């Protein structure tokens, strides 16, 4: 599982260091390959980053769905078609494809945020907006009871 939030900087070539804790998890599953794709939270774009094996499991689940179902088609068109395979280099960095950097509006400062079995990469400003909105919602007792916490 991925845990935590970390701020990093994208270099001029579009590379960014994956946080050491996230790299340790990838190394623990013996695979430093990831799959990166588009995502949105509350209307703000970010990137979902899956360990390769987790992505394969997602694809296997999708293959079991009705291939002509409109919802499945929309999801595959948006999420799967935008996916890129990436590999960590010897310095623990990933090269973020230009199309994904542009989609997520990634500038120099980015935030890596855990999302349980994957992590997300956010533009710092968008992360601050989404995190602030989430902090307001999570203080509501109904949500906490719904989650059982």
Image (spheres, rainbow, N blue to C red):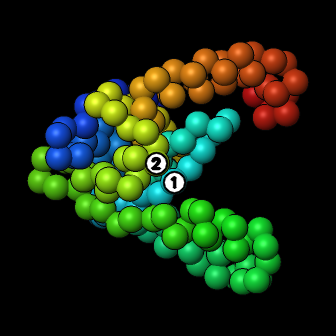
Vertical side of 6 occupied by 95: above or below: below
Q: Residue at x 51, y 54 (%)?
A: 38
Label 1, label 2: how far apart the Cα atoms are: 7 Å
- Point 59% across, 63% down: residue: 78
Q: Position of residue 20 (x, y in %)?
A: 26, 38
Task: Note whether 34 is above or below 125 in the view shown.
Answer: below
Quarter location, residue 43:
top right
Q: Which residue is mark 2?
A: 103
Kind of element beneath mark 1: strand
Query: Which of the two marks, 1 or 2, is nearer to us in this view?
Result: 2
Q: Which residue is mark 1?
A: 38
- In the image: residue 89, left or right of residue 125: left
Q: Position of residue 33 (x, y in %)?
A: 31, 63
Q: Is residue 72 visible?
A: yes
Quadrant for the C terminus in the image: top right
Q: Secondary structure at mark 2?
A: helix
Callout count? 2
Query: Between residues 42 and 2, which one lies in front from this camera angle?
Result: 42
Tell me the residue at 79%/34% (across/down): 147
**Residue 135 location, quadrant:** top right
In the rendered image, residue 83, in percent from the top left (x then y), is placed at: 45, 65
């Amino acid at each position: 599982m991925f845990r935590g939030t970390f701020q990093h900087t994208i270099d001029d070539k579009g590379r960014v260091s994956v946080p050491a804790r996230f790299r340790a998890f990838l190394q623990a599953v013996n695979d430093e390959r990831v799959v990166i794709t588009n995502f949105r939270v509350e209307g703000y774009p970010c990137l979902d980053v899956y360990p390769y094996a987790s992505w394969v499991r997602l694809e296997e689940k999708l293959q079991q769905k009705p291939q002509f179902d409109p919802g499945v088609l929309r999801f595959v068109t948006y999420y799967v078609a935008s996916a890129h395979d990436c590999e960590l280099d010897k310095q623990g960095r990933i090269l973020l494809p230009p199309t994904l950097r542009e989609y997520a509006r990634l500038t120099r400062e980015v935030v890596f945020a855990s999302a349980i079995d994957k992590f997300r990469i956010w533009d710092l400003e968008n992360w601050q907006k989404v995190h602030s909105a989430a902090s307001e919602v999570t203080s509501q007792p109904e949500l906490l009871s719904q989650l059982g916490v």
